[in-house]
Image (cartoon, grey):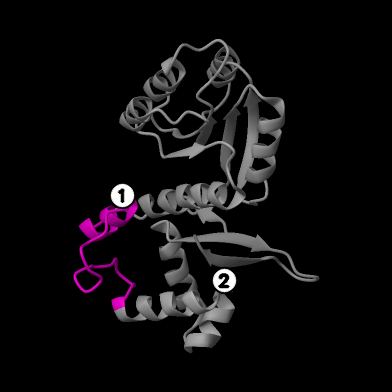
Amino acid sequence: MLYYYSAKGELTMYDVVIVEDDFYVASLHKKYVEQHADFNVVYSARTGAEVLAYLATHPAPHLILLDRYIPDVVELDLLWTLRTMYKSVDIIMITAAKDGEMIRQVLRAGVLDYLIKPVELTRFTASLERFAARTHQLQQGQLGQQMIDALLGITHETKEQQQYPKGIDASTLHKVEAALQVAEQGLTAVALAATLGMSRSTARRYLEYLVSVNRLVAELQYGDVGRPERHYKKL
């Protein structure tokens, strides 16, 4: 189980608001979100008026999952209203809309991700993991260019030219990726550590780095006894 901590060392739970007019879809997305122990759906709204009324009287969430088509909303008005009034809130669009011009406007609004319905669980999970990893990294203080590039998903022309954040060695990273290539069902940090002869903390650091740059997805696996483990798989 993975938790993140604020700069003050406080345990962080990520509050999520869902804006979706279809009750079944909203329930499904709520189920997806709450499979992760570090995310909590605090409210589900079916209209723009409902979500704005909720936000006016409650603390802002960390993340909003926003549908494109809301009955009382014209075009992207709700997205721009949320972006203007709640600048600290990340937004993931979840919609069936595929129009290029509209997607360009959404990206200009600074959404964290854009998911096409129906969303596969793996892709949905990857989006949440990306949000959590990025939030965690941005709490670490000043970032170098390489880390900023990783957060933005910018890759260099070749792996030999690529530079990595502190604590990530290119040679070791290549070994980790090779191990994941062989393990089609994915690996835990414990399994990777045993495979490559490294410590569990080192294995976890490399796996979490790959999650942060959207090359792996991490899921909780529950065994018969004990705490659940994070299981890492290629996207």
Task: Give me the disc on residue 71.
Answer: none
Residue 48 in percent (x, y) is at 55, 15
SS class, disc 1: helix
Residue 141 painted magenta: no
Residue 217 in percent (x, y) is at 52, 59
**Magenta portion: prevailing SS class:** loop
**Quarter-of-image position of residue 54:** top right
Image side of residue 186 versus residue 198, left or right: right
**What residue is disc 1 on?**
152
- The span from disc 1 to disc 2 (Cα, nearest Å) is 25 Å
Question: Which region is colored magenta?
Answer: 142-170
Give the residue drawn at x 21%, y 74%. 160
Give the residue drawn at x 29%, y 69%. 166
Q: In which quarter of the image is the N terminus?
A: bottom right
In this view of the protein, can residue 187 be seen by the observer? yes
Marks 1/2 in contact by CB < 8 Å: the verdict is no
Give the residue drawn at x 44%, y 70%. 205
Residue 146 painted magenta: yes
Q: In this view, does 37 lie above or below 92?
A: below
SS class, disc 2: loop
> Which amino acid type corresponds to the residue marked 1 in the rendered image?
Leu
Image side of residue 144 versus residue 92, left or right: left
**Quarter-of-image position of residue 232:** bottom right
Residue 103 in percent (x, y) is at 37, 30
Residue 45 in percent (x, y) is at 63, 22
Give the residue drawn at x 64%, y 36%. 41
Q: In this view, does 2 lie above or below 134?
A: below
**What residue is disc 2 on?**
186
Residue neighbourhood size for the residue with mark 2, other residues' Cα within 10 Å, grouped as few (<14), some (14–19), many (≥20): some
N-term mark: 1 or 2: 1
> Which amino acid type corresponds to the residue marked 2 in the rendered image?
Gly
